[in-house]
Image (cartoon, helix red, strand yellow):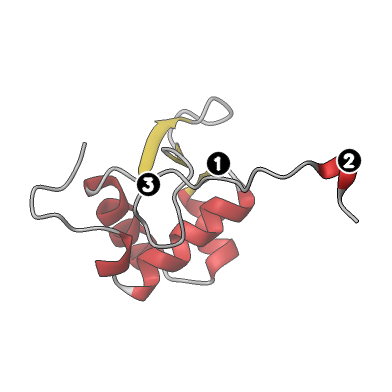
């Protein structure tokens, strides 16, 4: 699902960017876990997740440990500018000097 107005990660409020970074570093989390990690209010996290879902960056799944909660994860790796999949530089690791 993508936004119709062309909005991307750069256009989102700081709270949404923080939630994005928490998910990027700590992997799939519940909303409660995101609140604990980010130290944002539950309402702010809900709004940030809503905005991230609108532009197709975050995916919501069932949290099997507690079906009353949802598990949030990033859709795909995103480049720092929010433009798409981040590409890793191709270097020969064995021959670096």
The span from disc 1 to disc 2 (Cα, nearest Å) is 32 Å
x and y, in percent, of residue 38 in the image: 54, 67
Residue at 45% across, 54% down: 79
Disc 3 or disc 1, which is closer to the eye? 3
Q: Is residue 48 above or below residue 93?
A: below
Q: Which residue is mark 3?
A: 84
Which numbered dot is residue 28?
Answer: 1
**Cα–Cα span, label 2 and label 3:** 29 Å
As measured in the structure, the alpha-carbon distance from the residue carrying label 3 to the one carrying label 1 is 19 Å
The quadrant where residue 93 appears:
top right
Q: Secondary structure at mark 1?
A: loop
Q: Which residue is mark 2?
A: 94
* Residue 48 position (above or below residue 95): below
Above or below, comparing residue 13 to residue 55 in the picture: below
Q: Which corner quadrant of the image does residue 46 belong to? A: bottom left
Nearer the N terminus, badge 3 or badge 1?
1
């Amino acid at each position: 699902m993508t936004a119709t107005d062309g909005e991307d990660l750069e256009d989102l409020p700081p709270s949404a960017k923080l939630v994005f970074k928490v998910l990027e570093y700590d992997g799939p989390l519940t909303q409660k876990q995101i609140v604990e990690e980010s130290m944002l209010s539950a309402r702010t996290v809900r709004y940030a997740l809503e905005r991230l879902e609108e532009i197709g960056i975050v995916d919501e799944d069932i949290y099997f440990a507690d079906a009353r909660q949802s598990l949030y994860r990033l859709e795909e790796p995103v480049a720092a500018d929010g433009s798409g999949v981040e590409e890793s530089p191709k270097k020969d690791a064995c021959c670096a000097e």
